[in-house]
Image (spheres, rainbow, N blue to C red):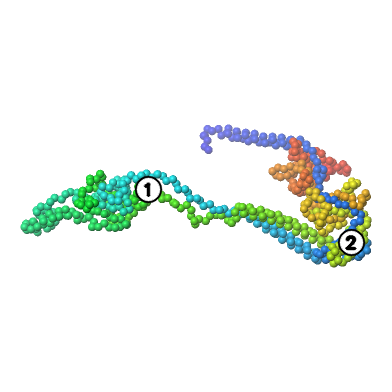
Amino acid sequence: MNLPANFPLKKVMITVVSVVIVIALIITGVTVAVNGKAANATVDVEQVSNISTQYWGDQSSTYGNATSDFVQELYPDKEKAISKIFVKEGDTVKIGDTLLQYDTTKLQLKVESKELEEKKKKYELEQAEKELTKLQNTAPYVEPVIPEPEPEPTPTPVPESQAELYTEITEHSKPFKGAGTEEDPYVFLCTEDAVLTKGFLLKLFGVTDPRATPTPTPTPTPSAEPTAQPSEVPTAAPQPTVTPEPTAKPTTAPTEAPTPAPIEPTEAPAVSGMAWFKQMTFIKTNETGGESVPTPEPDFTLPNGPFVARFEVHEQDNENLPLVKGWQMDGDKISAGFFNEVISEPDDIQMPDLSYADPGISYDTGGSMYTAEELQQMIADKKQQIQDLKLNVKQAAHDLEKAKLDLENATIKSTVNGVVKSLTDLDTAMSTSSPFLVVSGGDGFYITASLNESLLGKVHVGDTVMASSWENGQMYEAEIVQISDFPNDNSNYYYDGSSNPNSSTYQFTARIADADGLKNGMGLDITLQAASDNASNAIYLFKAYIRSDDGGKYVLKVGDDNRVHKTYIKTGKTIYNQYLEIKSDTLTEEDYVAFPYGTSAIDGAKANGIEENTDENDGIDARGLDA
C-alpha cells in the first residue's frame, strides 16, 4: 500500500501500540482477578474413603431348608472312571476325609474336548458375524428400469404446400423459391420421375431456340451458300448455270434446317433412374390423334440463362416436409455426370429417432442377485443364527467350566461327619439308579438349596453364605460343603432378577456351625456372594464428585500445596447406579477431593476440611503430607 508522503505514520504507530498495551492490560487484569479469586476461595473437601465403596461381586438370593440328618450320596457317572475308593461300609468319616478318587486322565481329555468345542463355537460365531456384515453391506438387486417409449409428440400442423408439383419441367415451370444464382438457385418441387423438356434445358443453358424466329423462304440466289461456306465461293463463281439446283433442297424442307442444331441430343440418357425428357417439341398432340394444336399462351416463362436450378423431392410432395432427394444443375458449368449428383439432406432437417431402447445395454444390478426383501430376510435369519450361536458359545463355556470343575474335584471328600452307611458295586447302582456310596451324618444342621448355573465357578466349596430364619428372625452363617455335579430336575431356587430364570440350577449343601434356635425342616432365606472378576481393592467413587469437560472426566483433588486442582481420571463400570469405578492410579482412598460444582469449586481454591493426624503429634496430616 502506497501512502502519501505527508501521511502521519507516527500517529498510526502510536495508536497501534496503545491498542496493544490496552489489550495486554485487560488480559493481565482478568488473569490477576481470576487468580486472586482462586487464591481467596475456599472449598470443602472429603476424603475418598468416605465417599467411595468397594465391590465384592454380585449377590444372588435363594432359599432352602435346615436339616439335622444330612446324608451324602454319590451316584455313578458314566463319564467318570473311579480309580480308587478309600473307605468301606461302616467306616466313620469326618468332613474333609477322602472317600474316592476319579481317573484324571479321562477327565483331562474331557476338558481338552470341551476346549476344542468352545473354540469351534466361537469360530462359527465369528464367521456368522462376518457373513452378517457382508449381507448388510450388499447392495440389493435392482430391476433394470427400461424407459418407456416416449409418446409420439403431437404432430405440428404442416402448412399446406404452396408450390406447384411438377412431373414435367418446362421453360414455363415456375420455381417456388430462388433467384437462379449459384447461392440462391431456382428450386422446383417435382416427383421422382420428373422429366426436363428441351425448352427448359435451352433456357437453363442460355441457348436461343432456333424456332423462336421464323426462317425466310430461300431464293435461288447463290448468296446463301457463300455465307455458309465462304472458302468455296471462288470455285463456284465461274459456273452460274449450276446455282438453280441447290435452291430446290432448301425449298423442300425449310423447317428442318435448324433442327440438327448442335445442342439437340439425339436421345435422353437414362442415368440414376431419371428420364432426360419425354418430349422435345413445344407442340402437343390432342387426344383424338388429330393435328397438333398450339399450346395456350403461358402465364410464366423462365428468363434466358444460363442459371442454376435445383430439383427437390419432398415427403408427401410438400416442400414443408423433409427432403427425400434432390439434384442441381448449373447451366453455365454443367458437368457430364451431373445426373449422378444427389443433393445431401440439409443440416437443419433432423430426421426423427424412433429407437428408444438399446437391447445391448448392460444394466447395473448393484452386484447382487438378491432383492431388498430377500436381503432383509437373510439378514434377519443371520441375526437369529448369531443369537443361537451366542447361546451355543455360552453353553460350550459352561460345559468347559464344568469339565474343569470335575477335574478339579476328581478327589471326592466327605461333606458330613458320619458313617459310611452303604457301598455297592457300580453296575448294581447303575441298573437301579441308586447311589453306590452313602454317608449318613448325625451332628449339626445343614442347609440344602440351589444356585444358578451362571454362578458355577464363582461360588466354591468352602465359601460362606448367610441364611436368615423366617420363624425366629435370626441370621446364620454357613459354609458350603458340597455342590452337585448334576442339574436339578425341580429346584427350589427362585429368581431374584440377577440371573437368567430359564437356566439350570444345581443343588448345594452348607453346614451351619452355630445352629442355636434352628429346627429340622425350618425354611431359610439364603444370600450367595459371587466372586468379582475385578480386584476387590478397586475404588468406586460417588458419581457426584466426578465431572467432565472436553478433556474427559476429572475430580478436584487436593494437591501438595493444600489447594484443589483439576485431575483427569479413567473410569470403568457403574455399580448400584451411583458409584463409578476409578481405573487410574491418580486417586487413592487417602486422597481428598472437593465437590466439583458451585462458585467456590475453582481450580486452585484452598482446601478446607482436611483432618490432621494428632495421634502421633508428628506434624503429619491424614494424607501422609507434612502439615
Res 614 visible: yes
Residue at (19, 49) in percent of width and height? 212
Q: Residues within 10 Å of mark 1 (few under 14, many from 20)?
A: some
User: How far apart are the alpha carbons under marks 1 and 2?
Assistant: 116 Å
Q: Residues within 10 Å of mark 2 (few under 14, many from 20)?
A: some
**Mark 2: secondary structure:** strand
Percent position of residue 328, x then y = 31, 52
Front residue (pair 311, 519) = 519
| Residue 368 position within the rendered picture, expressed as x and y whole percent measured from the top left | 59, 56
Residue at point 48%, 53% (across, down): 357
Question: Mark 2 or mark 1, which is nearer the start of the sequence?
Answer: 1
Query: The C terminus is located in which quarter?
Result: top right
| 361 vs 8, nearest the viewer | 361
Q: Residue at x 80, y 53 (%)?
A: 452
* Camera-side residue of 101 and 38: 101
Q: Is residue 16 left or right of residue 618?
A: left
Q: Identify which amino acid the numbered label 2 is placed on.
A: Val
Residue 426, disc: none
Residue identified by numbered label 1: 321
Q: Which residue is mark 2?
A: 438
Mark 1 near mark 2, Cβ–Cβ under 8 Å?
no
Looking at the rendered structure, the secondary structure element under dot 1 is loop
Tell me if 228 is positioned left or right of 58 in this view.
left
Residue 183 placement (x, y as % from top left) = 32, 47
Mark 1 residue type: Leu
Question: In the image, is residue 227 above or below residue 23?
Answer: below
Q: Is residue 96 visible?
A: no
